[in-house]
Image (cartoon, helix red, strand yellow):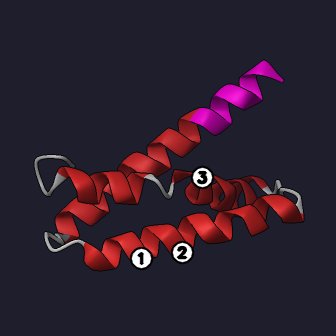
Amino acid sequence: AYAAGSLPFVSIVKSAEPATMALINAVFFGKLLPAPVYASLIPVIGGVGLASLKELNFSALCLILSMMVNVTSSLRSIMAKGLTN
């Protein structure tokens, strides 16, 4: 992902990892988190959106690769938590 775009853009997209993890938990594993957790994600998602608007070096490939990193990191965390429980 870093080779496909700028470091700030990759960092911006990666900061959405908590939202990705919550979405994967809900959609694929049926594990809903408490409402305050979802409410706390709203500022994170809004901040990522605002920061992305200011990024001049947008690359669709970089976005796709960064989101793939988010998904795999989220799955790793979910699976590790599942193994310890």
Residue 4, by quadrant, is bottom left
Q: Is residue 29 left or right of residue 19?
A: right
- Residue at left offset 57%, top offset 64%: 44
Does the segment drawn in magenta span residue 81?
yes
Badge 2 or badge 3: first in the primary sequence: 3
79 w.r.t. 12: above or below: above
Residue matched to label 2: 46
Q: Amino acid at mark 2?
A: Gly
Q: Amino acid at mark 1?
A: Leu
- Residue at left offset 55%, top offset 69%: 45
Instruction: Read off the magenta span.
Output: 77-85
Secondary-structure class at tag 1? helix
Instruction: Give the quadrant of the C terminus.
Output: top right
**Which class describes the residues within 10 Å of circle 1: few (<14), some (14-19), or many (20+)?**
few
Q: Marks 1 and 2: in contact by CB < 8 Å?
A: yes
> Which of 69/5 is in front?
5
Badge 3 or badge 1: first in the primary sequence: 3
Residue matched to label 1: 50
Residue matched to label 3: 18
Residue 60, by quadrant, is bottom left
Q: Is residue 8 left or right of residue 67?
A: left
7 w.r.t. 73: above or below: below
Q: Amino acid at mark 3?
A: Pro
35 w.r.t. 54: above or below: above
Secondary-structure class at tag 3? helix
Q: Position of residue 34 (x, y in %)?
A: 89, 58
> Which of 45/1 is in front?
45
Secondary-structure class at tag 2? helix
